[in-house]
Amino acid sequence: MIQYFKNINNQTVAIDKPENGIWVNLVPPLKEEEFHELSEVLEIPIEFLRDSLDIDERPRYEIEDNVKFVVIKTPAENNSFNDSDAYYITIPICIILTHNHIVTVNSFDNGAIKKFLNTFEKRHPDKRSMMVLKIFEKVVQNFMEYLKEINHKRNLYEQKLYDSNRNEELLNLMRIQKSLVYFVTALRSNELMMLKMERTNFLGLTEEEREFLNDLIVDTSQALEMANIYTNILSSTMDAFASIISNNLNNIMKRLTSITIVLMLPTLITSIYGMNVEIPYQTTAHAFYIPVVLSLAVSIIIAWYFMKKKWF
């Protein structure tokens, strides 16, 4: 679906057809017919529009026929029904700068474009480079918010894991770890793309805009550092819990083995006294109590020894 927005008297107004100095936003569902229509009307290479459909598209920029094309990754919630998939993934936002328009293409709904739309009345469509930087700013803000949410979830699942040691919490932590892998990869690619963009001045930025881009690079580096820290903490936590679970299993097996030994020796004694052969003291009046007392004595001695060794 194609959306056209124009800033009129500091108000964002949706219009029905493209005009000069407007923002064109493509949102799902995306259709091939719309790609062809937009490509002809705005003179955009159709490959730029189709690249947005590839969820694995890496952050990059290029220029063709004086049309500038920028791809940046932004976080999004994963709507997969598979319980083992990551909570969050990263999706591409394609930004296209024509002679008179700024075009954004989204293969999925994402918060960065929604935030940009909410503040569009404060923008000047004629300053297209600054608008691109503002989209970058919303992307960085989204990463920060999702990272804080991930850290909060991690703390909750860790606390539950301390109390229960269930597999469910471990699986949830694994899903968070997958999300962090997506974030680290996307943030690193975004940072490299911004650094290259700053070095080449691809957008033709003014001095003020270059300072703003430099601030965005710093914020992206900070988000990347946060993602790396959370990843390291989570990896250490999962390794520690794996060791704890393994140690608990060893302790349980040790207790079960000790109980088996305590029960095995009395069973051996009673089995010997149950043989159909001549056995000492079998004719006495206390023949029944001899194996019973002997079994209890052996069990108590062995149990005392194991308790002294702290095997119980």
Image: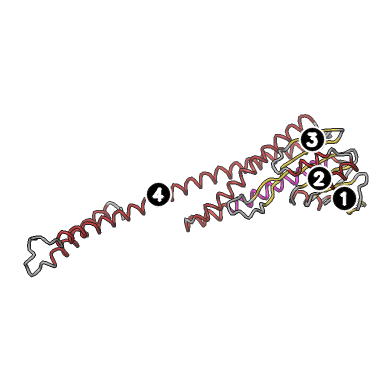
Quarter assignment of residue 217: top right
Counting from the top left corner in percent of width and height, residue 190 is at: 71, 38
Q: Is residue 31 visible?
A: yes
Label 3 and label 4: CA atoms lie apart by 55 Å
Helix, strand or loop for disc 3: helix
- Quadrant of the rendered structure where residue 70 is? top right
Earlier along the polypeptide chain: callout 3 or callout 4? 3
In three-dimensional space, the C-alpha distance between marks 4 and 2, rounded to whole angstroms, equals: 53 Å
Mark in the foreground, 4 or 2: 2
Can you identify the residue that label 4 sits on? 247
Identify the residue at image location x=64%, y=43%: 182
Measuring 76% from the left and 33% from the top, which residue is drawn there?
197
Find the distance from the CA under tag 1 to the CA under tag 3: 28 Å
Residue type at mark 1: give it: Tyr
Question: Which residue is identified by label 1?
Answer: 4
Instruction: Give the residue type that dot 3 points to.
Output: Arg
Q: CA distance from mark 1 to mark 4?
A: 61 Å
Q: Is residue 298 above or below residue 134?
A: below
User: Which amino acid type is marked by label 4?
Assistant: Asn
Instruction: Name the amino acid type tagged 2.
Output: Thr
Query: Dot 3, how many residues are within 10 Å of its Cα: few (below 14), some (14-19), or many (20+)?
Result: some
Residue tagged 2: 104
Residue extending farthest to the bottom is: 285
Circle nearer the N terminus (1, 3) = 1
Residue at which label 3 appears: 210
- Count neighbours of disc 1 (C-alpha within 10 A) and say few if under 14, some if 14 to 19, many if 20 or more: some
Q: Where's residue 179, x and y in %?
A: 62, 47
Q: Which residues are magenta?
A: 130-153
Check disc 4: other Cα within 10 Å, few if <14, some if 14-19, many if 20+.
few
Marks 1 and 4: which is nearer the front?
Answer: 1
Is residue 137 shown in magenta?
Answer: yes
